Image (cartoon, grey):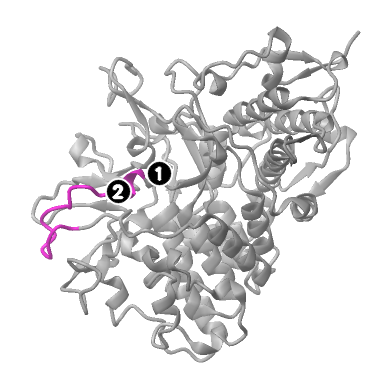
Amino acid sequence: MKAKYIITALASVITGMALTSCSDMLKTDTESYLDIEGLGTYNANDSLYSAMGVVRQLQNLGERYMLLGELRGDLVEVPSTADYNLQEISNFSISSENIYSSKRDYYSVINNCNFALTKLDTLIMEHNRKVLLPDYVSIRTMRDWTYLQLGLTFGKAAWITEPLLSLEDTEKNHSVITLDEIVDNIISDLTPYTEAETFDYGLINNYDSKCFTVSPTLMLADLMLYKNRYEEAASLYYRYITNNNKIINSLYGNQWKNSLATEIKETPQHATSYISEVLAMIPYSSDAKDLHPNLVNLTYNPEPSLLPAEWWIRDMKIKAHYFADNEDMPYPSAILEGDTRGEMIPSGTGQTTLGDAFISAGILGTSIPALIAKFYNNANEYSVVSNPNNSFFENGNQRILTAVALYRIPHLYLRYAEAANRAGKPTIAFAVIKYGLRNEVLNNEAAINPEERADGAIWTNFEAATFNDNRGTASRGRGLGVAKASEFVIPELPSRIDSIEWVENLILDEMAAETAYEGNRFFDLLRMSRHNSNPDEWFADKVSRRFPDPVAAKSRLINPELRWLK
């Protein structure tokens, strides 16, 4: 009997090779099988189907990526009315029966990637170009990203690089390695392809297909940072920034129209930056009947399963906002209260006009203090689709999320700042948040300590004209005047390491403001904990602040084994 592999990607190879519509390419078909004994080396058309098939399989991991990355962080609370599987993860009391403990979807992606990688001949040349290499690199990177998610979810995984006939008992039949060993393997696996191109099939479903896989450069940078190899990480982030001309644009911010905070500017863009600034995503079909993440219903609901952490809402609402009509003003014309990347409540109204990461729910006629709004803001509206299980949408105008962001420009810059800071350059890291890295900032000794540029590290050079419009991430929520705020500075501290730790905590806060509820918070906390002398205590201290009894929670969460699903 001929061996069969589940490989959604190549269903069309069997029936003919005719390209389907862009929308169809993102539909999930889990019943398709490929007879691999009758198929030789792939051609370019096979390669496209293989790569897009893996993308479609990753759709099964999109919602899980966000949930598992945020429930074990510090920015999400799970109410007692929520599904017990979510409560278990949030409380770090995960049973082996938890529905999120299944590894099959992860290993299915990995197995299909392994199959495709054995068939792709990267030496095939067309017009002096290795035509299948971008697909090969993309599939390899998607496999390694999936391995990383396995490690970050379970703390271990079986490392398998050859196709399997069966996924049953995968870990019983193969040696299992730890998260740190997985990271080492991925670094070795991707390093030869650091500069390689990934696939580009143009626009699919109005999304840039180049964003359907994480760049190997970015994945390697993140893993170098996880391994505390700071200069290598900073160099890789810088390489991606300069190769792709990426900047932090202050236009993606929520701004007040006047110094009294009574009115919002007409086009605040930060609320939709979850999709508009994406560098890597898991895309879904635009057809409302197809598979989609349920993140809108889980968060924007009279009975939500996930809520914004109360401590973080309070923290965002008391952050200083330095209002200025424009960034050229010599000083802020008013100091207001509240980081507008959380929500904006015009003075005197008591009503939220714009909820970015979260929204005060009184306006919706519920008793819930606040709701997560990020997915609602970035979802597509379907006027004829109702949802009787969610009274917000029971009469139509259902919102459906058609992409889960994996990496955005703010991740890129803030992780660069994290690496630069730990590499001994805290003023350069702080400049990412306050000023933006560009020529006039780098040559301003009031902003940048000249000692931090004395080594001539190429990754500190942002003098090209490309970066003239680079602005601090904080300008997006703490006002255009933040760069001129005299009290927003690194304080005088006893030592360089004290300054580094102060800046690192600021970076962590800024990551929350810019990237909350995007699935990366657990990894951010885990990675940053490793920069500290007592990583388990550092991690427990950060996560425990969302619990009713932080002291008791911290004493329990110091145990690293509680972090992993069983």
The answer to whether residue 466 of the structure is visible from this angle is yes
Which quarter of the rendering shows the C terminus? top right
Q: Position of residue 94 (x, y in %)?
A: 62, 40
Q: What secondary structure do most residues of the magenta stretch adopt?
A: loop
Identify the disc placed on residue 269. 2
- The kind of residue on which mark 1 rests is Ser
The answer to which of 288 and 498 lies nearer the viewer is 288
Residue drawn 10% across the image and 63% down it: 260
For the N terminus, which image quadrant? top right
Check the image and report above or below for 501 versus 250.
Answer: below
Q: The magenta stretch spans which residues?
A: 256-272
Question: Mark 1 or 2 closer to N-term?
Answer: 2
For residue 446, side relative to residue 479 (left or right): right
Asked if residue 267 is among those painted magenta in the image, a careful observer would answer yes
Quadrant of res 479:
bottom left
Residue 60 included in the magenta stretch of the image? no
Looking at the image, the residue that sits furthest to the bottom is 494
Q: Are marks 1 and 2 in contact (CB under 8 Å)?
A: yes
Identity of the amino acid at label 2?
A: Gln
Q: Quadrant of residue 423?
A: bottom right
Query: Can you give x and y, in whole percent of width and height, for residue 59 in the image?
Result: 57, 29
Q: Residue at the location (59% across, 69% down)?
A: 419
Q: Is residue 492 left or right of residue 226?
A: left
Residue drawn at (76%, 25%) of the image? 43
Secondary structure beneath disc 2? loop
Using the image, determine if residue 10 lies above or below residue 133: above
Residue 449 spot, x, y in % from top left: 48, 87
Q: How many marks?
A: 2
The residue tagged with tag 1: helix, strand or loop?
A: helix
The residue wearing badge 1 is 276
